[in-house]
Image: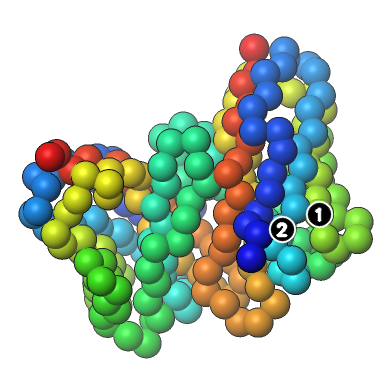
Amino acid sequence: EAGVAQSPRYKIIEKRQSVAFWCNPISGHATLYWYQQILGQGPKLLIQFQNNGVVDDSQLPKDRFSAERLKGVDSTLKIQPAKLEDSAVYLCASLGGVPSETQYFGPGTRLLVL
Amino acid sequence: DQQVKQNSPSLSVQEGRISILNCDYTNSMFDYFLWYKKYPAEGPTFLISISSIKDKNEDGRFTVFLNKSAKHLSLHIVPSQPGDSAVYFCAANTGNQFYFGTGTSLTVIP
């Protein structure tokens, strides 16, 4: 079974530029999460999708962050414009459709904003 | 509001000894508690979980203990091996929502 795929693995941009991350979850997984992990902290939920609908985006800075999962499969997360404090690892995770207690994470995208 | 807390940012243990990682939580409605292991430049990987209706779950060298009255759980690794050196995250879920602690960096000294 293929795992959660993310790209790119690394990205360096200057502040005020835009950037996009892509995630392909495990096949058949209906629930998809985007997390932001700042160095020394635990993953912080940005947005949760159930199929192509948003379940929770309460901690997503909507003035600069956006995410979509149009066909209920892969997802993109965009930052526009980026700020220095957006430097972090962006993790994508998915959860199966049956009741399950665990998520499966991708390798993450490490973003550095200069 | 940090619902899951790991108060020890780091831990060093000699190879062969027991490693004990601790976690506290505030929400009594959590259904499951989980431990994830994270190596540098990789995403977290699931290690072991425990249902809120149990007080112990064991998988090989890894055992998780849950004390609901104290809202506390711990991960025991015995014997510890150098390959166990990683950051360990405690997490809890209710429904499909997950809450993570800040992690404990474990170093197992050969």
Q: As shown in the figure, which amino acid type bears the numbered disc 2? A: Pro
| Left or right relative to B85: residue A111 | right
Labels 1 and 2 within one chain: yes
User: Horizontal placement of A99 versus B24: left or right?
Assistant: right
Residue at position x 58%, y 44% from top? A107
Tally the numbered discs. Answer: 2
Whether residue A102 is visible to the viewer of this picture, yes or no, is yes
The subunit carrying tag 2 is A
What residue is at 49 percent from the left and 35 percent from the top? B41
Percent position of residue B93, x then y: 51, 69
Question: What secondary structure is marked by label 2?
Answer: loop
* Residue found farthest to the right: A70
x 56%, y 64%: residue:
A103
Give residue A25's mark: 2
- Which mark, by number, is residue A54? none
Residue ID at (39%, 63%): B47
Chain letter of disc 1 in the image: A
Q: Distance between the residues labelled 1 and 2?
A: 6 Å
Q: Percent position (x, y) of residue B102? A: 40, 46
Quadrant housing residue A6: top right
Mark 2, Cα crowd under 10 Å, few <14 / some 14-19 / many 20+, is many
In x, y percent, where is residue A14? Answer: 72, 13
Q: Amino acid type of disc 1?
A: Asp
Question: Is B81 on the left or on the right of B36, as rendered?
Answer: left
Residue A74: mark:
1
Q: Quadrant for residue A1, please give it.
A: bottom right
**Do the residues bearing badges 1 and 2 touch, measured as CB atoms within 8 Å?**
yes
Q: Earlier in the sequence, mark 1 or mark 2?
A: 2
Q: Is residue A62 above or below residue B4?
A: above
- Mark 1 Cα-neighbour bin, 10 Å: few <14, some 14–19, many ≥20: many
Q: Quadrant of the C terminus of chain B?
A: top left
